[in-house]
Image (cartoon, rainbow, N blue to C red):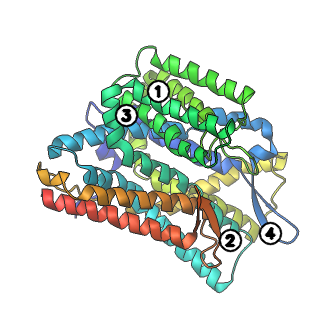
Amino acid sequence: MGQKISARELAAATPSGRDRVIDLLRVASLGTVVLGHWLMAAVTVDDDGRAAVGNLLAVEPKLQLLTWALQIMPVFFFVGGFSHALSYRSLTRRTGGPAYALFLRARLQRLLRPTMLFVAVWGAGALALQLSGQRGALADVAARLVAQPLWFIGIYLAMVAFTPPLLRLHERYGWAAFAALVAAAAAVDVLRFAAGVPYVEFLNFGFVWLAVHQLGFLRADGRLSLRVPWALAAAGLAGAVALVAFGPYPLSMVGMPGEKISNMAPPTAALLCHGMWLIGAVELLRGPMTRLVARPRVWRTVIAANGVAMTAFLWHLTAMLGVYGAMLALHVPLPEPAGAAWWLQVPLRIAAAAALTALLVAVFRKAEQPPAPAATAATAAVRRGTGPAAALGVTLTLFGVLGLSMVGFGGLLDGHSAVLVAVRVTAPVTVAMCAAGWLLVERAGKSTAARTA
């Protein structure tokens, strides 16, 4: 067992050619999402003691314009495309040929291990509460809400799974591959809104996010330089404004309670335009960001944050709801959302949520630590046998995680269900899919590594 390496030691060992801006964007994008969730949550309790979690943006619709800057998840997926391209190419060179199963396992270990631990802990806790019949004011709401961010894990799984074929398309067609995904996303919206074709909108979970991911490939090949960021930002912003002003698209770039049309679920062409403008904007800031992460103290902070980012993301809603639960238990009054007293409480609630998140990270961070790398000597065995099993594993995990994000942990015993695309799923089914898929990915990767050792 090797010694744990500190952030200071990792910073000192950073290769000179590493693109540190990518690491900064990864941390900043997830941090912005966490802060946004903490800010937007507005918990209220009715006269019967039932708790409800509202959305600040629904209470104050004028604030929805802020989502045009703060809905930063496209930047995270853009960063993912950059990292996946470099990782797959490096692994292919080291193994002497395509290594799909090894690539999946290597990329998914730090993603799925903390995720499966989160699912196990929350699943066991929710089951225990339901069996005991002890449900607090926030218990049912929390069991449903804490699983919602798992949609991001599902989409990211799809990006990892599709990296090899889409990278080949990128290497052959370049910008045309990105344009094809944009055109496909636009066509889906036309079929959805103009022709009323049922279920077609779910295709944009793939087309929209994979188009953003494809921009990461272009960034990895140095093709977002010169005037390209200006063009991306201008075209994306103009497109988003036009679609919202003249089309059926809402102003908010995040999901809103009760809305008939969401830009997020499923994603729309408006959200794709929003992603393009954000990516263009961050690329225009590459120079200042490069100078920022060149500072040793900043770089050490970025490295330390990257080491726990996924754990913090998974548990941040648990921490926020824990803070509200403590306030209710201590009979701290909850002011009317968006009022003066509510805003005065915001800094204290966020500080408390940050402290509780840090505690949860300290408890669960070990699952995010990468294992020792497996030997990957060049051999033809890499190219045989394990790819289909790994692909099936990712597919099961993807749909399991997406389904769990919709149904939550609250219906483990009572059969509560939700519609995933066109199929109705329950919490036990989605948890079983997650576990089976993860085991397939692990076994495929171990089998390949053993044959290549």
Cα separation between marks 1 and 3? 28 Å
Quickly name the residue at label 1. 179
Q: Are marks 2 and 4 in contact (CB under 8 Å)?
A: no
Which amino acid does the dot numbered 1 rest on?
Ala
Quickly name the residue at label 3. 20
Q: At numbered mark 2, what does the secondary structure look like: helix, strand or loop?
A: helix
The residue drawn where x is 63% and y is 33% is 270
The residue drawn where x is 68% and y is 24% is 242
Residue 138 drawn above or below residue 69? below
Mark whose residue sits in front, 1 or 3? 1
Sequence-first disc among 2 and 4: 4
In-image side of 69 versus 378 (left or right): right
Cα separation between marks 2 and 4? 10 Å
Quickly name the residue at label 4. 50
Q: Do the residues labelled 3 and 2 touch (CB within 8 Å)?
A: no
Quickly name the residue at label 2. 139
Please identify the quadrant where the N terminus is shown: bottom left
Give 417 or 212, whichever is nearer the viewer. Answer: 417
